[in-house]
Structure formats: structure tokens, C-alpha cells
Amino acid sequence: MALIRSWVESANSPTTEFPLNNLPCGVFSTEETEPRPGVAIGDRIVDIARLEEEGIITPEGGTVFDVPFWNDFMELGEDAWAAFRAQLTALLTEGSSDRERIEPMLIPMANARLHMPFAVSEYTDFYAGYHHATNVGTMFRGAENALPPNWLHMPIGYNGRASSVVVSGTDIRRPMGQLKGADDDRPYFAASGKFDIELEMGAVLGGASDGPVSVAEADKMIFGYVLLNDWSARDIQAWEYQPLGPFQSKATATSISPWIVTRAALEPFRADTPPRIHPLLDYIRDDGPMLYDIDLTVAIQPEGAGHETVLARTNHRELYYSSAQQIAHHASSGCPMNCGDLIGSGTISGPLRENRGSLLELSWGGKEPVEIGNGMSRSFIEDGDRLTLRGGASGDGYRIGFGECTGKVLPAR
Amino acid sequence: MALIRSWVESANSPTTEFPLNNLPCGVFSTEETEPRPGVAIGDRIVDIARLEEEGIITPEGGTVFDVPFWNDFMELGEDAWAAFRAQLTALLTEGSSDRERIEPMLIPMANARLHMPFAVSEYTDFYAGYHHATNVGTMFRGAENALPPNWLHMPIGYNGRASSVVVSGTDIRRPMGQLKGADDDRPYFAASGKFDIELEMGAVLGGASDGPVSVAEADKMIFGYVLLNDWSARDIQAWEYQPLGPFQSKATATSISPWIVTRAALEPFRADTPPRIHPLLDYIRDDGPMLYDIDLTVAIQPEGAGHETVLARTNHRELYYSSAQQIAHHASSGCPMNCGDLIGSGTISGPLRENRGSLLELSWGGKEPVEIGNGMSRSFIEDGDRLTLRGGASGDGYRIGFGECTGKVLPAR
């Protein structure tokens, strides 16, 4: 697919993340306005709340953009999403007769502050990266028992904490927690010394269900995707996670990108899941390509450093289970799924060392610290470090991006 | 403490669960009215929405009872809760001059349908019953390794699924799920054959936090308590729970009682936690009695049976960690806690066989089926069975109850 040219000149640049093909959904404020829905186009944001106020955009189902989140619009469903995208594309296309009317409703992105794009109903995090699960399993249980017996048969996941999800740019406070090393007689309460990133993507649900759904139905429930950093305290996790799974180790914060890239924008980049090692059961069997060719990076910039260093490069295609498969599994027990649910993919690592999406893997549990330039190295995150995820899908002369997903780690309280 | 007599005669009966000392919070509807907040008194419900409409009750902070849940009121905080309780007590006390004005705002409970009393923000379930954890651990790992090493040092918990919480009376559909027995070559997808109850209580948060809180602060965040049945599919759980904990095995439904009994009503019944086997770290150390002398039962009634059979009797005092300790641990990582959060206690078993709060324990994993009368026995729940939790605290000539927490199990879809 080729670039769709817009009368917003900056949207036609081959380096922008926000060409007319993208139209991602965010929430912004300026000195003059409270947080409200907006769509990124080049270096501008279309003030969607104002378009609705002016009667230019009138979703069926009533007013949905007078709130500081996209949930009310997401609830309208697939047909409304498609109609909105088609109308916005027409308004912004090069040569559109609407230019004069719309141009005053564009805000320079440089003047805007970005907020959480949606209200998170519930947050579930999966563990669906084959290389990540293999790496972590090898470290903890040895290469022969790396993958748990269930791993190749179902997407393993756990419920996370929706209240901990924050938008890119939010500072992250290093957590306190209960720790106990192998040589300690008893546990103690202290700041985590093994604070880590997890490079993930998150699916944002627009549709809801009140009973089992097929993989194809689950795919249609997805409104869009975000970048997601599942900050993880490895030492808290090691002591707490048996027998009921990760809890406080994952509860401090989960950062997401400020822009939801819609499923519609990503359609041209669909990719298949990897070959199956065991056939999957019918209820989660593959039903078409439901991963995406989205390249992903994570970079680190220590406090005071003049530049950042890329830690890893990977791709959404490296996942073993798609978000649709995760949702179909999630709903299989009858668990109701809701608009606003956020489904973390799990850490996306690739086959090579430079593809590893966590410091735990990159430094192999701290045994092989990662060089990050200027004579510095890292086993885990240090105070003052800024970690930044980026990602995008590259078409013919254009690129679809999410904006940065960044956070700076502050010392524990 | 003695009974406070009310001009509502049924509230003075020694057998009612709803004397004036109780004043629990629920949401009800009738043929004439949509769901709205109400308070139980004897065999009546006080229409709190109407009291507010008429200007009789005017919480500081504006209108809070024009919605079908108690969250807006709960958000007002401790002082508002105390003022409301004092005012309602005065209005309903024997001899009150307000009787004529209030009496028309009482609805016969028999004419009302009860709904979810609050909107669940997030749901966390703990594993804080010493006897339950010991029983389950003994079954799965042997008596010498019954308790996980961390268990005596922190309340072990996992995040549950808020969307699955339903009010008492809701039918429960037996879940489908991925199963694999020890002798099976590969997993299959089928109806759970080991569907179970967990007799718990839940703490309902009114207060919020955005960083660590002390145990004393956590206690003050609790608005009240409900009975809670954490329906559990043991066979789904066995195959899925390693390494990230229970997920679909707990996601079908969690039933709660229709009435939130406030912390204020339970004050006279405070009880200490059991003696500590190891001293607890400061951040979760006991700080006064924060359990309650609440006796609890669970009963079963098979389809077509003329009567129910009590399966187990236990008490809230049997917990090793209080809800306040659970919340302090939950917030220790900086995890934000919110009004409307529901904190499950974990299954409450006592030291004897008749005190066991789950069929898993009662039938010892199915090896010792439980006799339930009429020549019937149960290892796990069968289709058509109705399971009912009841609980209460007994004062001098009165009893504080929660209403039933009941659900009938329907065949899998």
C-alpha cells in the first residue's frame, strides 16, 4: 500500500510516524484546553472533540468525544470505527475542499501534552513470546525444561493491575518490596535492585463478550494496539511468584504509548504466527494472519548522558500467540471481556541476543552486563535511566508509528 | 454491645440479620423503580435514593445516591460514612419523631430484587487462610512442604478479574477449559469436571492510595465487607497455573453477598490474628485486631432435593492475614488502590475437617467424597447444585448478617 497524501504537508514526509494512513487515537491538552480526544497527522493533532462540537463528525450513537478518553467511541463498534476513519481520511486528503474548515482545528503537537488515550477497564498480561519464555525458562530451570509443559498448548497469562497503567512520559518510581536472596536467612523490605523493562505490545479492546468467542471474533474485538513497557522487579518476583504468580513485582507501573494505532491502519502489515510445534486446540487455532510486521526497539539513556543507546531490536511477528488467540483463550471460561480491556502481549524477544526484550535476558540474569557506551554497562535499570520503546510498520514510502513509550526511573521513596 | 431498638419492628427480632446495629448497603429495584441504593432494616429496605431526593439525607460533596451503586458515597470518605450512619440510626431509632416521614420510604424486602451493591474497580484474591494453604499444600506437595517458603512472611495473592464478579442469586455456568490429566498424552478442551467453591470474605475499599500505606491506614480505607464465593475449576487450574498463577480457572464467576456490611457495624466484633509463627516485617506487622468474629457456613442443595446440607462451618478469625495487611502489602510496590477495589480474603478453613471451606479440602481432592444426605455424596459440584454461603456476627440479643451468597450451577454450554 502506498502513502495517501494529505494537505497537511508534514504528514507526507517519509519519516513521520503519522501519515494519513495512520490516524492514531490519543488524548491531548493545551494551555487553553482540557484533555480531549485527538488524532495525530504529521506534526499536528486534529481536535476531534471540536470536530464533533462543530457537527463535522457525528458518530451514530450520540456524542462520544466530549470525554477525555476514546472508550465511548470504541464502544460503538466496527462499523462506526470504519465510518470515522473514512470520513477523517476524506477530510484530510490532499485536495479536499474541507481544508479551510478543518485547518483551524489542527493543534501543533509541540504545544500539546499527551494523556492516557483510554480508560483501562482491566489489564491482562500474557507470556506469549517463544524466545522470551525459552530464555527465562533456561535461566531458571535449565535448557531442557525451559518451556513449561502447558506453554505450547495455550497462551499463558495473568491478570495485571489496571490502576498501574500510565501514559508515556510518566516518571516511574523504583518499587520497594519484600526480597529474599538464596543466601538470606529471612526476607527483608527494601528497594528493588533488579528493576527491569519488558518490551511488549498491548491490544486495546473495543468490543465486549459475555461468553466464549472464536479467534476470528476476538480479532474483530480489537480496536487497536499500543506499545507497552511492563516494568518488572525481578527480585520481588523471584520471592513472591510461587505459587500464585507475579503480583507486586508487576504492580508499580506499566507504560503505554500515547497513541492507539487502529487495527485498520495496521491491516496492510498482517503477518502469520510462526509454525506450530504442536497443533493448537480448535478454540485457539490460527485463523488467518493476526500478528503484524511491526519493528520494535528499546533504548536506554542514563541521567546526564548525551545520547541514548539501543538495547534491542525485535518484531511483533516473533510472538507465538496473537492477541486474538490470547483473547479467545481469556474468554474460554466465560470470563466477560469489556471495552477498554488492555491485553499485553508478553515480552517480545527474537532469536538473537540483540533481539532480547528485557535486561534480564540481555544481561542473562546479571551475569553478562550490557555495554551501553561511554564505558557504562547495565545488568538492570539504575536510578535516573530513561527507557524508551519505539515501533512502527513500514509501507511503500511511509511509516506507521505509535509515538515513544518512555519513562525515567526515579529513586525509591 | 446491645441491640439498638428500631420502630421497624422486624428489626428488633433476635433472628433478623438486619437490626439497626447493622445498616448494610445494597442496591435494589422493584417493579416500579430502577436499581438504586438501599439499606436493609429488618424485613424492609430503606430507599436511600429517595431519602436523598427528599433532602432528608444530604451527604457533603453533592448528590451521590442517584446512581445504582455505592461508589460515589464510598468515595466521600470516613467522616461522611460516620455522619450517614449516625443520621440513619437516629431516623430509624425507636421513638424517633421522623417515623411518619420515613415509613413510606421503606420497601418490603420480599418485593425487591437485589443487584451488585458497588461497581468493582479491580478484584484481588488472596490466599491468607493458614489451614486452607496447609491443606492444599499437603495434597499437592506433601505435609513437609505444605506451605510455600514465602507464605508465613507475606500475604500471597493474585489479581482476579473484576468483570467476573456477580451478585448472589446469579446462576453460574460451569466453565469450559483446557484440561490435561497426568495420564493424558495431550490436553483437550472440555467442561470442568472439578468445579468447586471457595468460602471467603471480601473487603470493599472506599479509600484510595497512590503509594505505600501502613496497616492502620489500610484498615481505614475499608468501607465494609461482603461474603464471597470464589468459584474455582480445579482441573483447569492444575494444568494452567504454573508458572504465572490461576487464570481461567478463577475467571468464570465470583459471587458476593448483596449487602456490604460496613466496618462500623462490625467494630464490636474485632478479633486478633492468630499467633505469628515468624514475626512479620514492619510494613505488614499487626497493629490491633483487624479480623472479626464472624461465623461462616457453606451449604449445598442438589437440584430437586427438599433441603440443603451444611458442608462446613468456619470463622473469619481463622485467617492468618487481615484485609488491612493484604492491602498494605498490595500497595507496598506503589500499586495504586482505588475506591471500589474488592479484596478477597482467600479460602477460610479452620483446623477440623468440618471447618474446610472448599470441596477440594472436604473431599481431599476427591478421595473422600462428602456425604450430603439422601444417599448422595459430592467430590466436586454437580450440575443443578445450589451452593450458599451465610455469615454473621452475634452480639447481645442481635445478629449482624450479610444476606445469602448463593448460586446455582448450570451445565456447561
Image: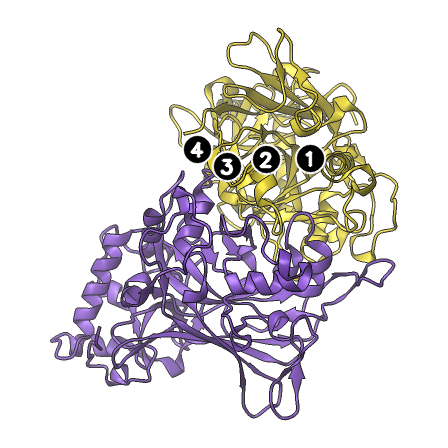
Chain colours: A yellow, B purple
> SS at mark 1?
loop
> In the rendered image, which residue does mark 2 sit on?
A183
Q: Which mark is residue A35?
A: 4
User: Are there few (<14), some (14-19), or many (20+) residues within 10 Å of tag 3?
Assistant: many
Residue at 66% from the left image edge and 35% from the top image edge: A201
Label 3 or label 4, whichever lies nearer to me, is 3
Q: Which mark is residue A347?
A: 1
Residue at 87% from the left image edge and 48% from the top image edge: A278
Q: Amino acid at mark 1?
A: Thr
User: Are there few (<14), some (14-19), or many (20+) residues within 10 Å of tag 2?
Assistant: few
> In the rendered image, which residue does mark 3 sit on?
A252
User: Are there few (<14), some (14-19), or many (20+) residues within 10 Å of tag 1?
Assistant: many
> SS at mark 4?
loop
> SS at mark 2?
loop
State the quadrant of the C terminus of chain A: top left
> How far, Cα to Cα, is label 3 from label 4?
24 Å
Q: Amino acid at mark 3?
A: Thr
Task: Residue B252: tell me if it is visible.
Answer: no
Query: Percent x, y for residue A79?
Result: 66, 47
